[in-house]
Amino acid sequence: MHNHALDHDEAGHEYNHEHELKHRSKWPMKIVIVLTAIIFAAEIAGGLLSGSLALMSDALHMLEDISALLLSLAAMIIAERLPTPSRTFGYHRVEIGAALVNGIFLAAISIVIIAEALARFSSPRVIDSTLMGVVAIVGLGANLVAIRMLHGSTDLNVKGAFLHILGDTLSSVAVIVAAVWIAFTGQTIIDPLLSLLIAILILASSIPLLREAGRIFLQFAPRDVDTDAVIRTIESVESVDGVHNVHLWSLCSNINVLDAHIYSCETDARRLELIKETIKHRLVQYRIRHSTLEFECRECEDFRLVREMRD
């Protein structure tokens, strides 16, 4: 006999584990914000002293990143607030808004870098390549630490932060290469060439983030969940005779939501409750944390249409 109480405990344990992972991801974000702020200050000073436009533009890039990281952290904190009578799902959707803003920031930054890179072709300047390289190496080291801390998260905001830091890392590498090239050849054209390449890479990295955040914002079915498989899973539960009016979407990057009508000839209230608990337990594998299941003992018009289409 299946232990439904155990199913309920396992589902609750998995939900709590997911919440704990989300809570822990805030600490790396805080550390990365501090590191990024330090690099920003160092690159502003280094850019002013060395005359390097590459360092200055990279510093402005990091200033945008600090704003985006703070926005992401704020969204993660707000999302943990408990639901209220007027905000029944809490603040989970704030994460998606922040992710969209981060993606737009990435795209906007890349356009600014492209414009600056094109301007540098016609207005080269004398650059202290030694100071430029030293500051860039310090920035690269801090960025590598930040990447290590943020890598592997499934949270969209952390992913957005990771992409920001990845862009900073590429910028630091480009500045180091430019500094070495200028030191040995005196040619400053390498600076706008590498800046142009970095801008294209940043723009390309922002597209997947915007696409995924847009899917969630528009309440599309999760990309990694097969709606037909979800329906088959529900129909595999004993005494479930059919499923229709299925609506599946994502509340945030970690929580999926489902509404569905369940057709069943079962009339015993206790038995129906066990069926509902079994369905909800099986839905956990699809990260469906909230489900509204409406049981019907008679074929409604929608169910008849579904059955006719299948036949």
Image: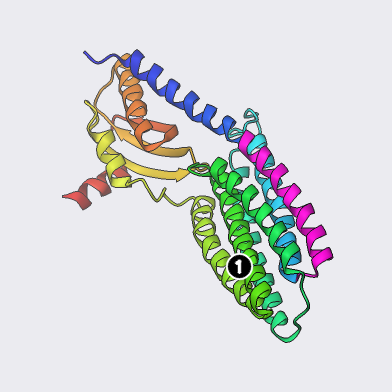
Residue found at the very far left of the displayed protein: 311
Please tell me whether residue 228 belongs to the stretch shown in magenta: no
Figure quadrant of the N terminus:
top left
Q: Residue at x 39, y 32 (%)?
A: 293
Residue 125 image offset from top left, x and y in percent: 78, 79
Would you place residue 23 above or below residue 252 in this image? Answer: above
Residue found at the very far front of the displayed protein: 184
Left of 17 or right of it: where is 278?
Answer: left
Q: Quadrant of residue 184?
A: bottom right
Which secondary structure, mark 1? helix
Chain part drawn in magenta: 27-52
| Residue 72 appears in the picture as rendered | yes
Is the residue marked by circle 1 packed among few (<14), some (14-19), or many (20+) residues within 10 Å?
some
Would you place residue 75 above or below residue 2 in this image? Answer: below
Q: Residue at x 42, y 38 (%)?
A: 259
User: Which one is in front, 270 or 73?
Assistant: 73
- The residue singled out by tag 1 in the image is 177
| Residue 100 appears in the picture as rendered | no
User: Which one is in front, 279 or 214?
Assistant: 214
Residue 162 image offset from top left, x and y in percent: 57, 49
Q: Residue at x 35, y 22 (%)?
A: 277
Q: Residue at x 60, y 69 (%)?
A: 199
